[in-house]
Image (spheres, rainbow, N blue to C red):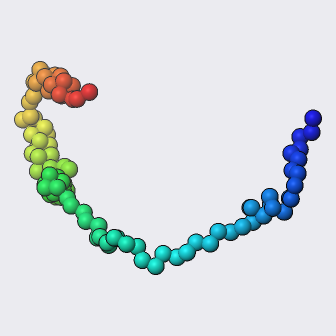
Amino acid sequence: MDDFMKIWGNIPDVSGIYNKQKKVNKVSEAAGTTIKNDVVSISSKAKDYQLALNHLKDIPDIRCDKVEEYSQKVNSGNYNIKGKDIADRIIRSAFDKKI
């Protein structure tokens, strides 16, 4: 059998369907439409969060006064800490982490 489709009749009418362009009339005025401005509102919780972040930016990551204080204690031999205290803090921090 042939792999061709046979078209009987007036071929220009068939191909003419694809060549026609439809005219669209312009809309002169849309009824019932109004122009609205976009509005953005920020919740008070988000404002509080932003304020807290701004204050955190002012706090230094390293507290030089504390580093200096403990450096002096370690260098002078006056900084003594028990191994048990260190172990307790390590275990406590492991349990405090959320999984």
Q: Is residue 59 visible?
A: no
Residue depicted at x 11% and y 41%? 70
In the rendered image, which quarter contains the N terminus?
top right
Above or below: residue 80 compared with residue 53: above
In the depicted view, which residue is nearer to us: 95 or 63?
Answer: 95
x, y percentage for residue 53? 18, 54
From the top left corner, tell me how far across and down residue 61 is, in percent.
Answer: 20, 50
- Whether residue 82 appears in this view of the structure is yes
Above or below, comparing residue 70 to residue 42 in the picture: above
Residue 19 sits above or below residue 67 on the image: below
Could you tell whether 77 is left or right of 21 in the image? Answer: left
Q: Where is residue 84 in the image (x, y as percent from the top left)?
A: 11, 20
The residue drawn where x is 17% and y is 55% is: 43
**41 left or right of 14?**
left
Q: Nearer the viewer, residue 9 or 65?
A: 9
Residue 9, image x, y percentages: 87, 55
**Residue found 14% across the figure and 40% down from its top:** 75
**Left or right of 59: which side holds 25?**
right
Query: Relative to the observer, which residue lies in front, 5 or 35?
Result: 5
- Name the outermost residue toward the left: 78
Q: Which residue lies furthest to the front in this view?
A: 9
Most distant residue in the right direction = 1
Q: How many marks overall?
A: 0
Q: Quadrant of residue 41?
A: bottom left
Q: Quadrant of residue 58?
A: bottom left
Quadrant of the rendered structure where residue 77 is? top left
The quarter of the image holding the C terminus is top left
